[in-house]
Image (spheres, helix red, strand yellow):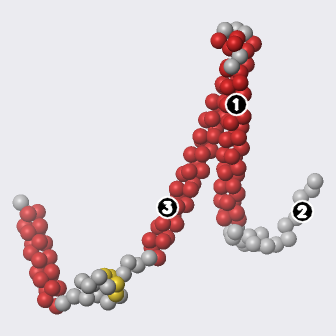
Amino acid sequence: MAKKASSGGTGSGKNSKGGGAKSRRITYKRRSLESSEKRLSDAMLRKANKKMSLAMEPEVTKEGTKAYKNFQKASNDYYTTQRRYQNAHRLLQDKRGREAAKRAKEDKRNYKQPFVNGFGEATKRYITSAAYERAQRRQDREIFQRLNNRQRY
């Protein structure tokens, strides 16, 4: 089958930088990871069932028999599939973790915690007194002077 030529759209111009292509590519990779994880999970289940059914044969413990060789092959297939599943699962979990961290960072950036006054009321107004601010400045000055004196020694 011949491919159809592109007829414009998002990200298809001569000077385009690929507008929506990146987001589609990311969702495609995530979908492919999810589908490969599901596919490998199903394959691992089938291979585990096959391995268990072969383990029930009486000749499996005798080295060199056909049953023994079949069991060894089924075991190797199962463990190979298991490793592939674990890799896909780890990649998917990492991707989900990065997306969650990114969302949390954006949420934290957009959220401003309200000021709560002494009565437990949330208010946008900063409540303080001039005497308190003067005392804070005086304490800060004393602390900075002590730190500066300590650095000289």
Residue 31 at what x, y percent from top left? 69, 55
- Above/below status of 34 relative to 100: above
Q: Picture quarter containing residue 17?
A: bottom right
Residue at the spot 56% in from the left edge and 56% down from the top edge: 96
Per the image, the residue denoted by label 3 is 101
Question: Viewed as shown, does residue 65 lie left or right of 140?
Answer: right
Residue 71, can we see it? no
- Tell me where residue 118 appears, x and y as whole percent: 24, 83
Q: Nearer the viewer, mark 2 or mark 3?
A: 3
In the image, what residue type sits under mark 1? Answer: Asn
> Label 3: how many residues lie within 10 Å, few (<14), some (14-19) or many (20+)?
few
Q: Which residue is mark 2?
A: 4
Numbered label attached to residue 49: 1
Please tell me whether residue 121 is drawn above or below residue 47 in the rendered image. below
- Pick whichever, 56 or 33, lies toward us: 56
Q: Give the position of the C terminus as an image quadrant.
A: bottom left
> In the figure, residue 126 lies in which quadrant?
bottom left
- Where residue 53 sits, quadrant-wise, is top right
Q: CA distance from mark 3 to mark 1?
A: 38 Å
Q: Nearer the viewer, mark 3 or mark 1?
A: 1
The residue type indicated by label 2 comes to Lys
**Which type of secondary structure does the marked residue at label 2 adopt?**
loop
The x and y percentages for residue 95 are: 57, 54
Q: Which is nearer the N-term, disc 2 or disc 1?
A: 2
* Residue at (49% x, 61% y) in the render: 101
* Mark 2 vs mark 3, CA separation in Å: 40 Å
